[in-house]
Image: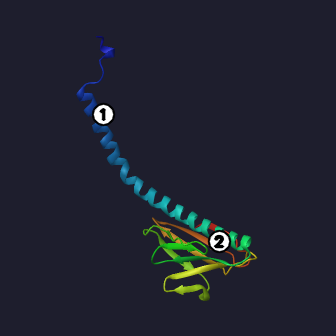
Amino acid sequence: MSAASRGFTLLEMLLVLVLAAALVTLVAPNFGPLLARAQLYTAARDVASALRYARGQALVRGRGAQFELAVDEHWYRISGRNKTYPLPASIGLGLYTADTETVAEGIGRIRFFPDGSSSGGRVSLSGSGARREVTVNWLTGEVLLRED
């Protein structure tokens, strides 16, 4: 058997494993903030998508639709659906809407009307040193996602 066709020794394999473990130890702590920020951005996109869906349903069906957010319990729901959608507990939530759209302590809604307009409002999401805002224009019902 020639030297080129022998394979790896146990010592070489152990050395590679030790180097790989050292790299993982150095790199792993840097992924925490990246994952938290990705969670924030995903949650903000989900909220914006749900608001756009509610507006679309109001336009298509010709009757009002609403987006309801429970700030303390970290969930939202859309009228016409029996499901609540969870948001990560690590994200700070805020809802700014008309006083008439407050359902209970920590629960409020943004209402969309058949012509596409809305009661207006803003959902703020924060975490890991970043902040995203989803605003709903009261006149047009347009939903905008912004980084603050």
Relative placement, left or right, of 24 versus 46 is left
Q: Is residue 141 visible?
A: yes
Give x and y (percent) for residue 21: 30, 42
Give x and y (percent) for residue 76: 53, 73
Q: Is residue 148 visible?
A: no
Amino acid at dot 2 = Ala
N-terminal of the pair, mark 2 or mark 1, is 1
Judging by the rendered image, the residue that carries numbered circle 2 is 54
Q: Which residue is outermost to the bottom?
A: 100
Of 57 and 24, which appears nearest the observer?
57
Q: Residues within 10 Å of mark 1 (few under 14, many from 20)?
A: few
Counting labels gives: 2
Judging by the rendered image, the residue that carries numbered circle 1 is 16
Q: In which quarter of the image is residue 33?
A: bottom left
Q: Which residue is outermost to the left?
A: 11
Q: Gap between marks 2 and 1, in whole Å?
A: 54 Å
Q: Is residue 106 above or below residue 78?
A: below
* Residue 5 marker: none
Q: Quadrant of residue 51?
A: bottom right
Q: How crowded is mark 2: few (under 14 residues within 10 Å), some or many (20 or more)?
A: many
